[in-house]
Protein backbone atom coordinates (compact mmCIF):
# COMPACT_ATOMS: atom_id res chain seq x y z
CA UNK A 1 0.00 0.00 0.00
CA UNK A 2 2.91 2.29 0.69
CA UNK A 3 4.16 1.91 -2.90
CA UNK A 4 0.84 3.09 -4.28
CA UNK A 5 0.86 6.13 -2.01
CA UNK A 6 4.47 6.83 -3.00
CA UNK A 7 3.56 6.75 -6.70
CA UNK A 8 0.56 9.02 -6.11
CA UNK A 9 2.75 11.36 -4.08
CA UNK A 10 5.26 11.32 -6.97
CA UNK A 11 2.53 12.30 -9.44
CA UNK A 12 1.33 15.03 -7.11
CA UNK A 13 4.86 16.37 -6.74
CA UNK A 14 5.33 16.28 -10.53
CA UNK A 15 2.22 18.39 -11.16
CA UNK A 16 2.80 20.83 -8.30
CA UNK A 17 6.54 21.50 -8.65
CA UNK A 18 8.66 23.05 -11.40
CA UNK A 19 8.91 19.95 -13.63
CA UNK A 20 5.36 20.28 -14.95
CA UNK A 21 5.86 24.01 -15.45
CA UNK A 22 9.02 23.28 -17.42
CA UNK A 23 7.17 20.84 -19.71
CA UNK A 24 4.35 23.35 -20.12
CA UNK A 25 6.84 26.07 -21.10
CA UNK A 26 8.42 23.75 -23.66
CA UNK A 27 5.05 23.09 -25.29
CA UNK A 28 4.23 26.81 -25.23
CA UNK A 29 7.56 27.57 -26.94
CA UNK A 30 6.88 24.90 -29.55
CA UNK A 31 3.44 26.36 -30.27
CA UNK A 32 4.88 29.87 -30.61
CA UNK A 33 7.53 28.56 -32.98
CA UNK A 34 4.95 26.66 -35.06
CA UNK A 35 2.57 29.63 -35.34
CA UNK A 36 5.46 31.93 -36.33
CA UNK A 37 6.66 29.41 -38.91
CA UNK A 38 3.16 29.00 -40.36
CA UNK A 39 2.81 32.80 -40.75
CA UNK A 40 6.18 32.96 -42.51
CA UNK A 41 5.11 30.18 -44.88
CA UNK A 42 1.82 31.97 -45.62
CA UNK A 43 3.70 35.21 -46.34
CA UNK A 44 6.03 33.35 -48.71
CA UNK A 45 3.04 31.70 -50.39
CA UNK A 46 1.35 35.09 -50.79
CA UNK A 47 4.37 36.37 -52.67
CA UNK A 48 4.32 33.31 -54.89
CA UNK A 49 0.58 33.49 -55.50
CA UNK A 50 0.88 37.20 -56.29
CA UNK A 51 3.22 36.28 -59.13
CA UNK A 52 0.86 33.54 -60.30
CA UNK A 53 -2.11 35.90 -60.20
CA UNK A 54 -0.27 38.58 -62.15
CA UNK A 55 0.79 36.06 -64.77
CA UNK A 56 -2.77 34.75 -65.10
CA UNK A 57 -4.26 38.22 -65.44
CA UNK A 58 -1.59 39.22 -67.96
CA UNK A 59 -2.06 36.07 -70.02
CA UNK A 60 -5.85 36.20 -69.97
CA UNK A 61 -5.79 39.82 -71.13
CA UNK A 62 -9.36 40.42 -70.05
CA UNK A 63 -9.39 44.11 -71.03
CA UNK A 64 -8.36 43.33 -74.60
CA UNK A 65 -10.93 40.55 -74.81
CA UNK A 66 -13.68 42.88 -73.60
CA UNK A 67 -12.61 45.58 -76.07
CA UNK A 68 -12.58 43.06 -78.92
CA UNK A 69 -16.13 41.89 -78.32
CA UNK A 70 -17.24 45.38 -77.35
CA UNK A 71 -16.88 46.56 -80.92
CA UNK A 72 -19.22 43.81 -82.16
CA UNK A 73 -22.24 45.09 -80.21
CA UNK A 74 -25.04 46.98 -81.95
CA UNK A 75 -25.21 50.73 -81.37
CA UNK A 76 -28.22 50.76 -78.99
CA UNK A 77 -26.72 48.19 -76.66
CA UNK A 78 -23.29 49.81 -76.98
CA UNK A 79 -24.70 53.19 -75.95
CA UNK A 80 -26.52 51.70 -72.95
CA UNK A 81 -23.48 49.76 -71.78
CA UNK A 82 -21.15 52.72 -72.26
CA UNK A 83 -23.41 55.01 -70.29
CA UNK A 84 -23.31 52.74 -67.24
CA UNK A 85 -19.61 51.78 -67.59
CA UNK A 86 -20.38 48.10 -67.99
CA UNK A 87 -16.99 47.24 -69.57
CA UNK A 88 -15.13 48.51 -66.51
CA UNK A 89 -17.55 46.70 -64.21
CA UNK A 90 -17.17 43.47 -66.17
CA UNK A 91 -13.38 43.80 -66.08
CA UNK A 92 -13.48 44.41 -62.32
CA UNK A 93 -15.76 41.44 -61.66
CA UNK A 94 -13.66 39.06 -63.77
CA UNK A 95 -10.40 40.21 -62.15
CA UNK A 96 -11.96 39.81 -58.69
CA UNK A 97 -13.12 36.30 -59.57
CA UNK A 98 -9.64 35.29 -60.67
CA UNK A 99 -8.14 36.88 -57.56
CA UNK A 100 -10.56 34.95 -55.35
CA UNK A 101 -9.64 31.73 -57.16
CA UNK A 102 -5.96 32.43 -56.49
CA UNK A 103 -6.60 33.18 -52.81
CA UNK A 104 -8.60 29.97 -52.44
CA UNK A 105 -5.59 28.07 -53.73
CA UNK A 106 -3.59 29.52 -50.85
Image (cartoon, helix red, strand yellow):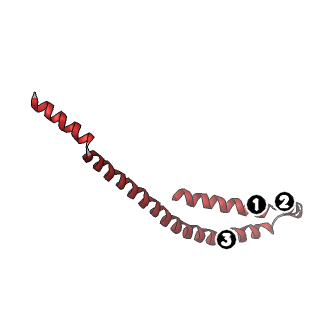
Report x, y in % for residue 58.
63, 72
* Circles 1 and 2 in contact, beta carbons < 8 Å: yes
**Disc assigned to residue 54:** none
Report x, y in % for residue 29.
36, 55
As measured in the structure, the alpha-carbon distance from the residue carrying label 2 to the one carrying label 3 is 22 Å
Q: Element under label 1?
A: helix
Upstream in sequence: badge 2 or badge 3: 3
Q: Quadrant of residue 56?
A: bottom right
* Circles 3 and 1 in contact, beta carbons < 8 Å: no
As measured in the structure, the alpha-carbon distance from the residue carrying label 3 to the one carrying label 1 is 15 Å
At 79% from the left edge and 60% from the top edge, which residue is drawn? 86
At 18% from the left edge and 33% from the top edge, which residue is drawn? 8
Residue pointed to by mark 3: 61
Residue pointed to by mark 2: 84
For label 1, the crowd category at 10 Å Cα-Cα, with few meaning under 14, some 14 to 19 and many 20 or more, is: few
Residue pointed to by mark 1: 89
Amino acid sequence: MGEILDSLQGLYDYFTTGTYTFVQEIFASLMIWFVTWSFKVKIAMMGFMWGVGQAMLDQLNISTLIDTYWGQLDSALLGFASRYNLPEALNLVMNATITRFIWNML
